[in-house]
Amino acid sequence: MTKVLLVEDDEMNRDMLGRRLVKRGFEVVFACDGEQAVALAAEHTPDLILMDMSLPVLDGWEATRRIRAMPTTASIPILALTAHAMDGDRERTIAAGCNDYDTKPIELPRLMGKIAAILDGAKGKLR
């Protein structure tokens, strides 16, 4: 079963997306802030991290940098989920260490396509 760390501070968004991922066969671990995301990434070593970028305690950009800095979590694919959709925001998330970027509100078919592409790419690196 593919394990996903869903990092989202909004309870309604976390619940909605979490239920949809579980329904599609993913095991989901939840974090509510960036500091918790870093700790849970190290503890669970998920197959994928869905990272909200606007988070309390530690924002998604810094949480991503910290996850990338740890040898045990450095290669975990990270997909940024953000309401930031201005020019340069995608580049900023990629520069922080995210593999891809998707905007909110979430369009599930588009997000699932990006998740599949990232996971397929990660599997390809293991071959």
Image: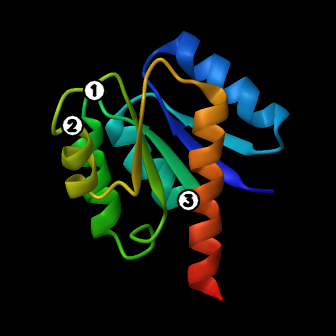
Picture residue at 37% right of the left edge, 31% below the top? 33
Residue 88 is drawn in which quadrant?
Answer: top left
Q: CA distance from mark 2 to mark 1?
A: 6 Å
The mark that comes first in sequence, 3 or 2, is: 2
Left or right of 119? Residue 8 is left
Residue 13 is drawn in which quadrant?
Answer: top right
| Badge 2 vs badge 1, beta-carbon distance below 8 Å | yes
Q: Circle 3 is placed at which residue position?
A: 118
Which disc is residue 85 wearing?
1
The mark that comes first in sequence, 1 or 3, is: 1
Query: Relative to 75, is 1 above or below?
Result: above
Give the position of the C terminus as an image quadrant: bottom right
Q: Circle 2 is placed at which residue position?
A: 89
Left or right of 64? Residue 79 is right
Q: CA distance from mark 3 to mark 2?
A: 19 Å
Is residue 75 in sight in this rendering? Answer: yes
SS for callout 1: loop
Q: CA distance from mark 1 to mark 3?
A: 20 Å
Picture residue at 31% right of the left edge, 33% below the top? 53
Residue 74 in picture, x, y percent from top left: 39, 70
SS for callout 3: helix
Which residue type does callout 2 highlight? Answer: Asp
Which residue type does callout 1 highlight? Answer: Ala
